[in-house]
Image: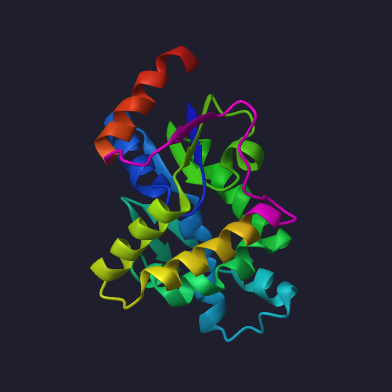
Amino acid sequence: MIITIDGPAGAGKSTVARALASRLGFCYLDTGAMYRAAALAALREHVDWNQPDDVAEVASNVNIHLADDRVFLDGEDVTDAIRTQEITAITRHTADNPKVREHLVVLQREMAGRENVVTEGRDQGTVAFADADCKFYLTATPEERARRRLLDLRARGEDATYEEVLRAQEARDRRDANREVGPLARAPDAIELVTDGMSIDEVVDRLVQLLPGKR
């Protein structure tokens, strides 16, 4: 069974998807982490971001592996390294790259083909797994999403203001919605859930309640 969870940044997709997978005994597939890892690899290779073919070549020649909520790049655990503001700012160069997306979507399908999976990202229900058994679209108000992102950054010891986070989020939302390949969009058959004011457990409980009729 494949369950997709899409939605904008800060909607709680990663945390909810991980918790839902744990609740169901499914594997969790963090596709956003794959694009972040590819961006980190390109950064380390000092790739010219204005040369998308070079970015794609790096992405296709590294090994990105997800296991036990950890992200590995050529065997190195980069789970924390890919969550910095620096990597967040440059991940658009891999997420917006058609060749990178094509390569990583193939990897995502290979990973999901072997397991029961909860997968989350921006285009899981529309592109990567358009025939998924169940699709969810999580969202929240921009203000709530920015507040959550700020808390995450401060928990990792990074300095940022609410205004800075909100501006960066607004720019990212525009890019995600207007990407030529795999834009952020709610699949027509996805169930939408606004998560403002809900705890992680409450969101997961609600998704579980919605599952039986979709199985």
Q: Is residue 42 above or below residue 182?
A: below
In the current view of this chain or complex, which residue is farthest to the top?
213
Tell me: residue 113, above or below residue 212.
below
| Rendered residue at 67%/62% (across/down) | 96
Residue 45 place in picture, x, y as percent: 56, 83
Query: Can residue 41 be seen at all in this image of the molecule?
Result: yes
Q: Is residue 164 magenta?
A: no
Indicate left or right for 32 with 101 as reference. left
Let me know if residue 180 is in the magenta part. yes
Colouring convention used in this rendered image of the protein: rainbow
Q: Which residues are magenta?
A: 177-199
Residue at the image point whose x is 39% and y is 67% from the top: 83
Q: Nearer the viewer, residue 153 or 135?
A: 153
Q: Residue at x 31, y 50 (%)?
A: 68
* Residue 205 horizontal/vertical position (percent): 29, 27
Question: Residue 7 placed where, x, y %?
Answer: 51, 45
Report the label total: 0
Residue at figure coordinates x 48%, y 44% from the top left: 120
The main secondary structure of the magenta stretch is loop
Based on the displayed image, in which of its 4 quarters is residue 77 positioned?
bottom left
25 to 82, vertically: above or below: above
